[in-house]
Amino acid sequence: MTAPSFTADQTSRRSTHRAPAPLRATRRRHSPDRPRRSVLLTALMGLTTVYALLPLAWLLINATKTQKSLLDSFGLWFSGDFALWDNITQTLTYDDGIFVRWLLNTLLYVVVGAGGATFLAVLGGYGLAKFDFTGKRAVFATVIGAVAVPATALAVPTFLMFSKMGLTDTPWAVIIPSLISPFGLYLMWVFAAEAVPTELLEAARVDGSGELRTFFKVALPLLTPGIVTVLLFTMVQTWNNYFLPLIMIKNPDWYPLTLGLDAWNEQASTAGGQPVFNLVITGSLLTIVPLIIAFLLLQRYWQSGLAAGSVKG
């Protein structure tokens, strides 16, 4: 048997047919793990990052300056002696250590107010998501309406009500309004509806578990990402709360950090007041440190909480 022979024309057609193979091999395939790169989106993300980090950089740089060099130097670069540690010491000891008192007040408002708001949001969201009752749609409409109403619109009516009750100029005037978080309730409602399977609850009830035990032993571990997410939102909202304490509290001993730093800042415009802008900037830097630590420690819970809905879908 003789080997098959090929003509020059057949060899040419075969080589021409195989030529595009390397081109197909080098073509990049895009997937969720390897998305298509966008120069425009990358540039926008870079601008957003700069916009977010620039104020923090300005705060950190100027916290290292003395009162004199703060006013005589460029804001985005260091100048003079490195005075960060001296500024921190002066901030914590100025006016008999009132900054520490303001910090403890803020922690009180956050622990009781934001913690209580998170707890109530978890209970309410779980109940609305997993139980059927008369008037559920009305409750849903009320919650959505409450989310749409800005907090500043309720500040004056709240002040008048608390004034009649004799609670103004007390910590309760800040804590009690902080316990209500319509957005946290709505977020927990949506999260509980997706994160806690109804079949799992029914199986626990069939096994003889009561409602409280089912909630704490079965549902609560599944709600952890949503709880941390709501806790972070309510904590930041209470920590940065300014308008409500401004109209409720007149005694500086009950000021939160926001009002205290504003009072220091206003000293320069009062008669005989001593400017302490370096302490205001250093105090602002110390104020955001607990929030940064909280976000870094709870970041994985927060991200999983926000992504739970999309992953479920």
Image (cartoon, rainbow, N blue to C red):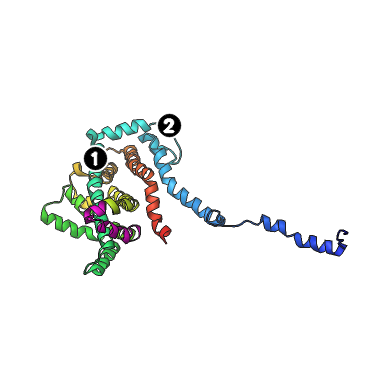
Q: Residue at x 25, y 54 (%)?
A: 214
Identify the element where label 2 is drawn. loop
Q: Quadrant of the C terminus?
A: bottom left
Q: As drawn, is 306 to the left or to the right of 209?
A: right
Residue 201: where, in percent of width, then height?
29, 58
* Residue bearing mark 1: 104
Tell me if residue 271 comes above or below residue 248 in the rendering: above
The relative height of residue 69 versus residue 156 in the rendered view (above or below) is above
Decide which of 193, 183 is in the foreground and name it: 193
Most distant residue in the front direction: 1
- Label 2, residues with CA under 10 Å away: few <14, some 14-19, many ≥20: few
* Residues rendered magenta in the picture: 192-216
Identity of the residue drawn at 26% across and 59% down? 206
Is 29 part of what is drawn in magenta?
no
Q: Is residue 182 visible to us here?
A: no
Total number of numbered discs in the rendering? 2
